[in-house]
Image (tube, rainbow, N blue to C red):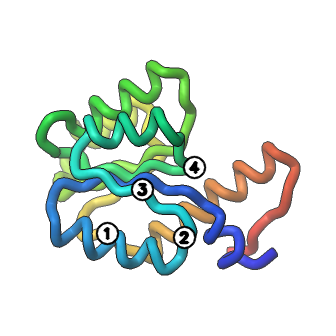
Amino acid sequence: MTEQNVLSQLHILYVEDELMTRNELSRFLKRRLQHLSVAENGLEALLLFENNPPDILISDLRMPDMDGLELTARIRALGYNTPIIITSALSDTETILSAVDRGIVKYLVKPIDTNKLKKHSINWLNNLFKVRNQIRIPL
């Protein structure tokens, strides 16, 4: 199975309140994934998550209604171990450590490097498939 075949089976939930940023990364992801869910804030994302848990969650840090850290805390409280990537223009140590303490797997500083995002997604897929005794995707 090729990298593209596996990525096309991946379900990602992407949460971003800024329209241009959301549209840009959504276009990138839609070209590679069969299933992409998109939310404008944490409350909307939590509802989508509960109805159809994704393989990976990518969330902005600062959003109205519910920020990415609160979203992460609520998902962890529900018992999900889904890989969560937080994106933000903030790169201060305190913010990053707070995100790590809540159980994220990666903190990406905006603008998002799509090559890094793709590489990390493949790594998480490899770990997921390893657990499920399936295939390994070469990087």
Whether residue 66 appears in this view of the structure is: yes
Residue 49, by quadrant, is top left
- CA gap between label 1 and label 4 equals 19 Å
Q: Is mark 3 on a helix, strand or loop?
A: strand
Which residue, given by chain and number where applicable, does mark 1 sit on? 112
Callout 1: helix, strand or loop? loop
x%, y% of residue 34? 57, 69
Give the label on residue 55, or none: 4
What's the amino acid at mark 1?
Ile
Residue 15 in percent (x, y) is at 31, 52
In the image, residue 22 sits, relative to residue 51, either above or below, namely below
**Dot 3 corresponds to which residue?**
37
The residue under the point 77% across, 53% down is: 129
Q: Position of residue 41 (x, y in %)?
A: 22, 45
Is residue 98 something that shows in the picture? no
Instruction: Select label 3 or label 4 by which is in front.
Output: 3
Tell me the mark number nearer the camera, choosing from 1 and 4.
4
Name the residue that disc number 2 marks.
Answer: 33
Task: Choose the circle earlier in sequence order: 1 or 3.
Answer: 3
